[in-house]
């Protein structure tokens, strides 16, 4: 921990600070520059650093406090340098093979779901997505079929063999959703719902953790750490675009986050080009880009008739568009050292 | 609802679209420009608009759909043009008198809370703030004293007579927290936790609804609409800064949001300059600015010894700084037509 | 042009507006909804639309004005649907073959430039980059070698045969730089320096137009339109990352912009992963992603000893890293239908 | 300067680094923590720091380099702790009295300018604003009357006695505009046009330096340093709103920047609520907020008929709105210790 004092700090201030730090049992190094004095503080536990930093910054003679170490451990790359592969009913996520998750934004009916599940299975998808509980900006919109939707997902799994990923939004629903889902999804709006993260951390069900639309990569890592710190290490990260000043696209897909996460963490990362762009015409290009940048797979919205979808129609791929994208990705995979 | 077609749209497309809309019972106006055709669609219920808009945008010959009306009604200014005043144990929020909410970020001990409560009461504050359940980016930080903290708040209320505002983060805690709190706070990280909004909407306890740090003003209004649509109209909005590219301050306090909300909504709005800046030295200036811009009050963090605070020390006002700020605001209030 | 009136607009207001528009020679369509009246205005010239829109929005009974058509024509895709290929001394930019531009951020010495030029040529680069005039946030930093740098570039071109791209920052330097450069670069800080855009538009030298770090894609298209409207159609767009709240990377590379620009414009687009990330370790992944998303090439910073570079060392590729990246891109190109 | 090494740094790396730094004549302090070694480097000149930092960051065993001192000196508060007051033909900017600058966005005609100048003078404005050279996103928009506009400004000054502020966009125009203007304005789009900053720095004419819409406060200070480093210290800073994700307002007025700049710099700062909001109805509230936060004045757009303005009509105040705002500010000024 590096403490930068203000130019006005007196010798008495420095003495007070170092006495204080030594009294807490920390080692202290003082480095006096021309204008400033810098104090190195050694031996602070990682779990103490955030609080200590804030306390020190509240002192009038302290200008900045710099924490060197990362605020997460369990999900950090050094914890497991070889990387994590998560096995979901035999589908390996994070290994050499790319994982394709596909399905409708929202489960609307048995026919819609089954038709889509069969098609994406036939095209080579590995996981079926579909929302039974849907977050919605407006209180008046459709909020999903609830448990009935979960039952339809289970039926689709039975028929196609595809494991299922679906969102959970309420701490009270975790147990129920976990009875059906193979992967629990934490949506972008709930990445900082810490009660939900803890509750999911208490299960051992794999989690798809979407990045908050205005969350730093480091905050996203800490959200994952919440889950891991409860004992659930089966975490799949998902970059789905961030909010910026650009409005032509629904979000700005943060392609940089893919290789950054690969450097910082051992967890698998997949890309959501549907939310990352908001436009079906852009989805195949961004899916390919994410794979080329090192993503372990993609999750995309597919609908038999986007113009009748209850949600996210403009960003949902029609069947033929999904088929074309899969062909494109099959050509791409070996060129970047992956299989599909 | 205005539907803008692509330049490539054919007469057949236009016919298909208008037949479709008429079959649903809507009125249709066609306006053919030089390059584009624009279709006006009349008679769509507000609650149908979002879904219909997405469906239409999924059509290949539709370029844009423009929804004219606001996506919220109950919290909109036209619903109650004279404005809303909320009575919290005799404190009127939203009226001519400004409301000052003050107290520690987090309840740390009986002594810390009582000392602060007495001081802010003496200086003229109207509401006591204090966190018993604290969201924290790191799983390893202090997360609050829980129910014990709520009991200390109740004790402080008994002694000082100040009503209390405190945060609730989990749907399962709403009932418990509501037994103690006079105002339930929804934090910035939970503005899009729709399950929580609904649960609070089911109570009749006044709510302090903070703006999400990356939420549009319109999305904030819709979060309020969630609460109101369940029957709880006692909503106080709170601007607390948004996330931008500027890093010198912790957040960018969106001063524009104050007069904008006054135009759009009948609800009271208060300002949180502590989170809006992240630096105690900037708090008084931004508190004054918010009042001058039309805010109905402020909520600020005060701590007897910020350098020992467990959270938010750098942005917490020392007692003497809070006293000075109150004097400043007392001079300011009458100049902007308010009392304090 | 669609004019949305406020709910308070009276019949008299509507009459005043339509009389006004008809008097200017425009066609008018009125569509009365339940709450609002919408007025379609037909026949406005594109060049008049922005001004007329602002005037109408200043009327108290006008809520919004929606301009349907794009604010650019010459650089729009419909103007030349087959796409533009720019020939720079035999190097075709925008065709089936990818273009690699590489070289040092800043020209520091004859040795540094020549050594780099020879190496990137040997590895298969097509264009040599290098800054003689450098924008710098600090007035005390190195601002480039000026004309001496241009002469070194010319010397490198003579030896290697690589055409050269270099930045021009001042309207007064356009003539001089154009005597040396094969491509004039407009940097991100000057994308809204309209005097510079006009001056370059008056030449016929190819231009590399970087996107402003906080410019909308639509504003970038208009900056290109400035150049084209003076008769210079030889414009190569360059996405180099935008400024967002994320600080782990220097910029957020906007990968969405690649397929968006391909939809909106006929101009070639290349990617700058050096500035788009700010870290050499991330450059190869983002270069590959950009190619997979449809970019026509890349521009990267290469330096023999990044730890001695006068600028941009942390994002400059060492020789061996550039070589590896080129191998990676050679495997990738055919998988996305391009050659290299 | 603090250099943080990676956890992988070896003793040999540390030795190489310290030898390198000592060979350049710097003092070195080594602080070995549990995981990391931190190296303090003493004696680096401010003007060398940026370049040295980048070089060090390019070393594989260096993780971060932290520069403690500010990257500007002449415009920093410590350089002139008492603050700067700039005298423009007798109008004191930065003192106890607030400065009101008002006038049309763009000079459109003699009548429009004279009528506005007389009115704002009568209402108590101190400086007349008006654009003769106008930046415009579209190449097809009106770009100002040029020198003819400057002559009209001079005529308005002669009649009303108001000093004039007007924008200059091109290095080649500085000399001409300086013959007419009492204050040269650098617009938001040119804050990083360093050639222009240098050219203006060579004059001794007062400058109004607008913040770039996506520029950090620290970058803005460095832009001011460009001007000061050439000898022109007559710099007035102007906060005019930044670009964020919020689109309801044209920009997000960064109210925090007002007290931040007062801490960091001795220069006067004024607020531009017209561009900071983009809506006339919001201008008076934000003008008052800026004054309450400590701004030394405001600059606002006023037009006799906003619905006929060639630019910025929606954000221009009508005469009666300007009059009301002035009354409001007159009540406010003494309550915040200023006069008007």
Image (spheres, coloured by chain):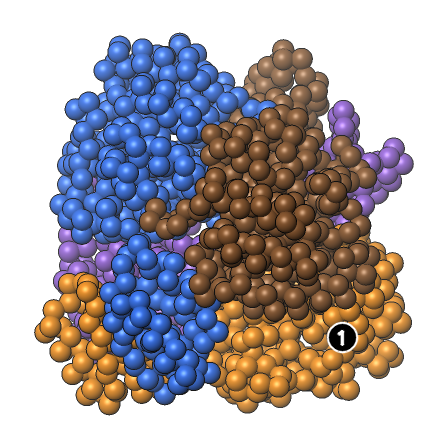
Chain colours: A purple, B orange, C blue, D brown
Quarter of the image containing the C terminus of chain C? top left
Q: Is residue A74 above or below residue B268?
A: above
Q: Nearer the viewer, residue C137 or A6?
A: C137
- Mark 1 burial class by Cα count in 10 Å: few <14, some 14-19, many 20+: some
Whole-percent x, y for residue D71 in the image: 64, 32
Whole-percent x, y for residue B97 in the image: 76, 78
Whole-percent x, y for residue D176 in the image: 52, 32
What residue is shown at x 15% (from left), y 63% (from top)? B8
Q: Nearer the viewer, residue A84 or B138?
A: B138
Q: Is residue D306 left or right of residue A155?
A: right
Whether residue D31 appears in this view of the structure is yes
Q: Is residue D37 left or right of residue A299?
A: right
Q: Mark 1 — on which chain does it sit? A: B
Write down the quadrant of residue D40 in the picture: top right
What residue is shown at x 79% (from left), y 76% (from top)? B339
Whole-percent x, y for residue C97 in the image: 17, 33
Q: Is residue A37 left or right of residue D127?
A: right
Dot 1 falls on a residue whose secondary structure is loop
Q: Is residue D296 above or below residue D39?
A: below
Q: In this figure, what is the number of numbered marks?
A: 1
Q: Nearer the viewer, residue A250 or D281?
A: D281
What residue is shown at x 19% (from left), y 55% (from top)? A325
Would you name the residue on which mark 1 appears? Answer: B338
What residue is shown at x 50% (from left), y 18% (from top)? C308
Write down the quadrant of residue A24 in the picture: top right
Quarter of the image containing the N terminus of chain C? bottom left
Q: Nearer the viewer, residue D168 or D215?
A: D168
Whether residue D33 appears in this view of the structure is no
Q: Residue furthest left?
A: B12
């Amino acid at each position: 921990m590096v403490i930068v004092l203000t130019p006005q700090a007196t010798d008495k201030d420095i003495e007070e600070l170092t006495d204080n730090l030594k009294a807490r049992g920390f080692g202290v190094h003082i480095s006096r520059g021309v204008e400033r004095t810098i104090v190195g503080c050694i031996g602070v536990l990682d779990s103490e650093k955030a609080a200590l930093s804030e306390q020190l910054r509240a002192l009038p003679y302290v200008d900045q406090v710099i924490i060197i170490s990362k605020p997460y451990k369990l999900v950090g790359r050094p914890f497991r340098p070889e990387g994590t592969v998560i096995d979901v009913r035999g589908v390996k996520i994070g290994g050499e093979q790319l994982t394709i998750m596909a399905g409708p934004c929202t489960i609307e009916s048995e026919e819609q779901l089954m038709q889509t599940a069969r098609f994406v299975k036939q095209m080579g998808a590995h996981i079926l997505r579909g929302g039974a509980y849907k977050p919605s900006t407006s209180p008046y919109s459709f909020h999903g079929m609830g448990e009935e939707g979960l039952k339809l997902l289970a039926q689709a799994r039975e028929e196609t063999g595809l494991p299922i990923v679906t969102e959970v939004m309420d701490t009270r629903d975790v147990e129920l959703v976990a009875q059906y889902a193979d992967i629990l999804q934490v949506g972008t709006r709930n990445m900082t719902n810490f009660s939900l993260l803890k509750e999911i951390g208490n299960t051992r069900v794999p989690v798809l953790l979407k990045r908050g639309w205005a969350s730093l990569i480091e905050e996203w890592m800490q959200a994952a750490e919440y889950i891991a710190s409860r004992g659930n290490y089966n975490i799949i990260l998902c970059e789905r675009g961030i909010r910026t000043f650009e409005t032509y696209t629904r979000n700005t897909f943060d392609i940089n986050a893919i290789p950054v996460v690969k450097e910082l963490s051992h967890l698998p990362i997949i890309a959501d080009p549907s939310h990352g762009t908001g436009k079906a015409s852009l989805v195949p290009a961004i899916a390919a880009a994410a794979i080329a940048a090192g993503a372990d797979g993609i999750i995309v919205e597919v609908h038999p008739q986007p113009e009748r979808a209850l949600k996210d129609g403009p960003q949902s791929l029609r069947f033929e568009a999904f088929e074309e994208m899969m062909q494109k990705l099959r050509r791409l995979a070996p060129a970047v050292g992956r299989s599909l």
